[in-house]
Amino acid sequence: MNKKFAFYTSKIGIIKITYNKFLEKIELTDRISEINERSSLSDQVFRDLEKYLKGELKSFKAFDIDKLEGTDFQKIVWKELCNIPYGKTKTYKDIAYAINRPRAIRPVATAIGKNPLMILIPCHRVIGSDGKLCGYAYGLSVKKFLIDLEKNNI
């Protein structure tokens, strides 16, 4: 089946949504492609993202982690990320312990870096053990924005 792509402009940049029958990926991109196939699914996901970015929505239901491309380990990590409460943060070590793999901090970090659904699977809520922001694919300024947004809307 062919993947479809929809593009939307938001306050954090251009959001690219990849989908087919279900949501496959959400990411920031630097440009809108000529092929922009918006649908009711992509429009709903974007509406939810817009509500989130206004502080009006605190969780998402438009996806199924088990349908995403990834290893079993990655999916376990992504599911654990969804357990981090809105407005709170956890460390990579916290996530490793939560999935009963306390020595797997680096693999946990790698799995988090492969998160296909930015914001929906809240990898931005994971920080370093020293409390500092680190490791966000879209830049630390976007990560800080998302963390501050949540802390200001609890």
Image: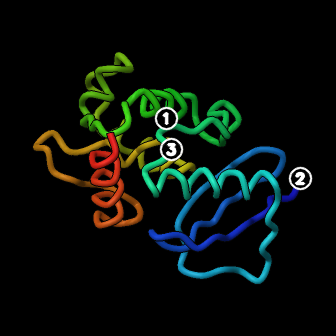
**For discs 1 and 3, the disc positioned in front in the rendered view:** 3
In the image, taking residue 19 as reference, residue 84 lies left or right, namely left
Measured along the vertical axis of the image, is residue 154 above or below residue 45?
above
What amino acid is at disc 3?
Leu
Check residue 78 in the rendering and tell me which mark sits there, or answer none.
1
**For discs 2 and 3, the disc positioned in front in the rendered view:** 3
Give the alpha-carbon distance from disc 1 to disc 2, as whole Å: 25 Å
Residue 61 position in % (x across, y down): 63, 35
In the image, taking residue 139 as reference, residue 32 lies left or right, namely right
Pointer 2 residue: 1
Front one among 23 and 108: 23
In the image, taking residue 122 as reference, residue 132 lies left or right, namely left
For the residue carrying disc 1, how many other residues have a C-alpha within 10 Å: few (<14), some (14-19), or many (20+)? Answer: many
Residue 150 position in % (x across, y down): 34, 47
Quadrant of image for the C terminus: top left
**Looking at the image, which residue sits at the far right?**
1
Measured along the vertical axis of the image, is residue 15 above or below residue 64?
below
Pointer 3 residue: 57
Residue 63 position in % (x across, y down): 66, 38
Q: Residue at x 33, y 58 (%)?
A: 143
Residue 147 position in % (x across, y down): 30, 50
Q: Is label 1 in a helix, a strand or a loop?
A: helix
Check residue 119 in the rendering and tell me which mark sits there, or answer none.
none
Give the alpha-carbon distance from disc 2 to disc 3, as whole Å: 32 Å
Q: Is label 2 in a helix, a strand or a loop?
A: loop
